[in-house]
Image: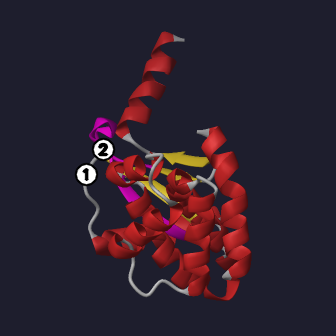
Amino acid sequence: MAEIATIARPYAEALFKVVKAQAEQAAEWLDALAVVAADPGLQQFAHYPKVSHQQILELIGHVGPKNLPPAGLNFVRTLVENGRLAVLPEIALQFHALVDAQSGVRKALVHSAFPIEAPALAELTKVFEKRFGRKLNVQVALQPELIGGIRVVVGDEVLDTSVKARLEQMKVALTA
């Protein structure tokens, strides 16, 4: 994975520099392109030796996002010509990180044993933003093995209030 991230970083940074003023719009079409590029059928088609770059671009034009801006067309063309189409999903992830950094927002992943409804998530977001001292983009991932409670990951910071974590702490205390 580190190799893919290393390859993707310069592309994400270059695209970010080109579309900095329209980064939010670029993130939308980049996500759509990433979904298309991740398709195994497209990957197989792109790696077939007799397929030209133009044929790959035409296929992406048919199945990809409509009304792609010139910067998007040039970006896809560059990826296809350099044989980096498979790296597009990772480029999209790194591009989002750059957009978030520009706007001062950090990604927060909330692991929960049960689904969290929108009003409760909004309240939790306010608490987390106060706790971590920054604006957060909160996403929820279900993890039933937590039994109850939540586990919040923001960058390299972790706040674990899950039942599973408490049981582990009790186990350590009892066996010490």
Residue 94 image position (x, y, % from top left)? 61, 60
Is 93 positioned to the left or the right of 119 in the image?
right
Residue 148 marker: 2
Query: As shown in the figure, which amino acid type bears the numbered disc 1?
Result: Phe
Mark 2 or mark 1: which is in front? 1
Residues shaded magenta:
135-151
- Label 1: which residue? 114
Residue 158 image position (x, y, % from top left)? 56, 47
Query: As shown in the figure, which amino acid type bears the numbered disc 2?
Result: Gly
Q: Quadrant of residue 20?
A: bottom right
Q: Quadrant of residue 12?
A: bottom right
Above-or-below relation of 60 to 144: below
**In magenta segment, residue 29:** no
- Is residue 117 visible from the viewing direction of this image? yes
Element under disc 2: loop
Q: Disc 2, disc 1: CB below 8 Å?
A: yes
Numbered marks: total: 2
Residue at x 39% of width, y 63% of height: 36
